[in-house]
Image: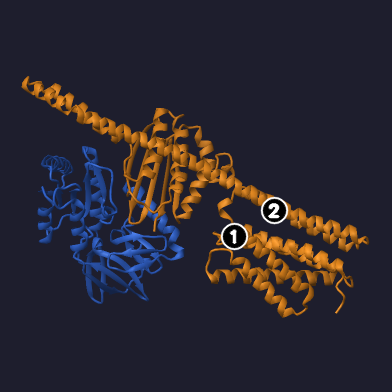
Chain colours: A orange, B blue
Amino acid sequence: MDKMDLEYIVEYLAVNIFWIYITNRFIGKFFEAKKYSELIQKTVLLFFYILNSSMNLFLHEPMWNLFTSILGIFMLTCIYEASVLKKIVITGMVYAISIGCDMVVAVGIGSYVRGMQLGIINNILSYFLIFIVELLIEKGLHLGKQEEVFTGKMWMLIGVPILSVAVICVQTVNRIANKQVALTSMFALLFINVIVFYLYDSLRSSYAKQYRSSILEHEVEEYQNQLSIMKESQDRMESLKHDMKNHFLALSHMLKNDSIEEMEKYLGQMIQITEYEKDYVATGNTNIDSVLNYKIQQAREKEISVTTDVKIVEQMEVDFFDINIIMGNLLDNAIRAAESADTKYIHIEMELDRGVLYIMMKNSCNGNIKRDGEKWITTKRNKEKHGYGIENVRKTVEKYHGSMEVNYDEGEFCINLLMYLV
Amino acid sequence: MIRIAVCDDEEYVCHELEKIIRDYAGKQNLAVEIDIFISGEKFIEFIEKNVYYDIAFLDIELKGTNGIEVGSYLRNVKKNDNTQVIYISSKQKYAMSLFKIRPLDFLIKPITEQQVIAVYEKAVELIDRGNLVFEFHVGHTYYRVLYKDIVYFESNGRKMNIILSDGQGGYQKKECYEQIKNIVEDVPCLDFIQIHKSYLINYTYVLQYSYEQVQMADGRTLSISRTYQKQVGEKLLMRKKRNG
């Protein structure tokens, strides 16, 4: 048994921090809810770190190492809310990746740099390789979907660990004599990686939070608006009731004088007052009513005529958040298009039928939109330009396993979509 | 001949509807027979005696037995999935129980002539498609069944099962030597949807859709295979677009 020199131990401990970081980060992408608090999570991490490091440094029994590694990874998965089977599967996968990369590095080093004692470099290369594999899996499986905002940049980020590996390999192959130089650069690379990804992850999550809160702000405005519409309607009914007696007197007076035409006109006015509601959507489903009425009012302010045909239930299995994203975005686009058209109109239809929610929206638009419109329908390149609007709608519809169709035809834009609510 | 029932406790609504439909059908040279009911109870009396209507306009807010109860009696007690139900209401608020009756449409009072004609046309199109005939033979016996009575087609090796409804909750299975892929072009494409290599179902007899399965009126739950899931979604969209 060779004497473990202090240097090696220190190096190993430092490098292991990196391994704990990437393993924890990767595992986190597979799960949703955390069962335990941050404190407990950090404690588990620390415990695992100490256990894992000591085992690997002092115990040279491969079986023990295997056991503690697998157990440690499993413990990390237990922080999350999920079935035991899922945790076992994830643990297995993470461990398999580790072993696989270890072997690749060992074989690779063995064949290219014969006879050199690389010591800690083995581990470093192995961990970088594990990191790259995990990032590729993360990107390939679209994990962390909720926060997918900078997706394009993800590819650039993978370049960071890849370039780090390149630097290490070049150094190693060129047998940099000064150990201090070699090791300093390697540790610097490790920590640069950690810093870069930590920043990236926190940026993503704060961006997602911002987006959510802006949607919530909209929701509040819509609710307020809905309340005022409801109140207005109530007030009108109240005043009608209040004046009932007077109305009856007036009508019977007209009847006595045989002024049928006047009566018709008068009754017509009274009916109009009660029909205030016809201008707005009142399905009893406050969520939908608020969103629709808010946007309808906006549209009418821009002199766009809006017609609706909404047949839905008061309680539906759709998240208000999702409804807001869909209806909000679709209507925003419709309003933007219709306000610059010759005839301004928007028609909204919603129907619940046999567990499926159908949404159809038609709006007028002018000829110029065609150029942009076609591009927008057929390619994804203009996704950035037209905002995340339609893409968000598509993603939300996909969440309900739905389908969406967009058609443009002779000055009219038409979107049809369906969502499964069961 | 289209048989229509109108059930509303406000007589003038019944008469208005009757007038609009009769005038329209007259112009189209179509024969219609219209029965008026001013209470839900009276209407139930008739359907209880198995009087069949192709279309039923039902007021939701009826005094006494309301529109939901009438619709529920029609669908759940009489097991009638074919009559097109069109609900009339003074409100836009609908309870889930209404949707379970799978109405063709909802009309909000006051109803315009255009609305009535539009929904009437929709109903007649569906009825006409349902009255088309499907022919098959078992051995030397030739059968003709109406598409509206076919619940679904099911593949069974070299044979095909045809599940038929008798309109009163009874289901029958007929077998014939035919393949779904051969008949899929001939069936009314808006009403029949292929959800699986082995299943071709009739939209009218579906109680509920989900992404992975459909619940049929005969109690069976059929699964939608992965290969067909996207198609089914597109078909449903197309159907809504065409039917309005």
Q: Position of residue A212 (x, y in %)?
A: 53, 45
Q: Position of residue B198 (x, y in %)?
A: 38, 69
How many C-alpha atoms fall within 10 Å of the one at disc 2: few (<14), some, or many (≥20)?
some
Residue at image coords 77%, 77%: A59
Looking at the picture, tell me which residue is in the foreground, A323 or A416. A323
**Quadrant including the C terminus of chain A:** bottom left
Mark 2 secondary-structure assignment: helix
* Residue B215 versus residue A146 in the image, above or below: below
Residue at image coords 71%, 72%: A99
The residue indicated by pointer 2 is A197
From the viewer's perspective, tell me whether residue A52 is left or right of residue A387.
right
Q: Position of residue B124 (x, y in %)?
A: 22, 50
Are the residues under marks 2 and 1 on the same chain?
yes
Residue at image coords 66%, 63%: A43
Mark 1 secondary-structure assignment: loop
From the viewer's perspective, tell me whether residue A110 is left or right of residue B9.
right
How far is the residue under mark 2 from the one under mark 1? 18 Å
Chain to which the residue tagged by mark 1 belongs: A
Does residue A343 appear anywhere in the picture? no
From the viewer's perspective, tell me whether residue A355 is left or right of residue B101.
right
How many C-alpha atoms fall within 10 Å of the one at disc 1: few (<14), some, or many (≥20)?
few
Q: Hey, what amino acid is under mark 2? A: Phe
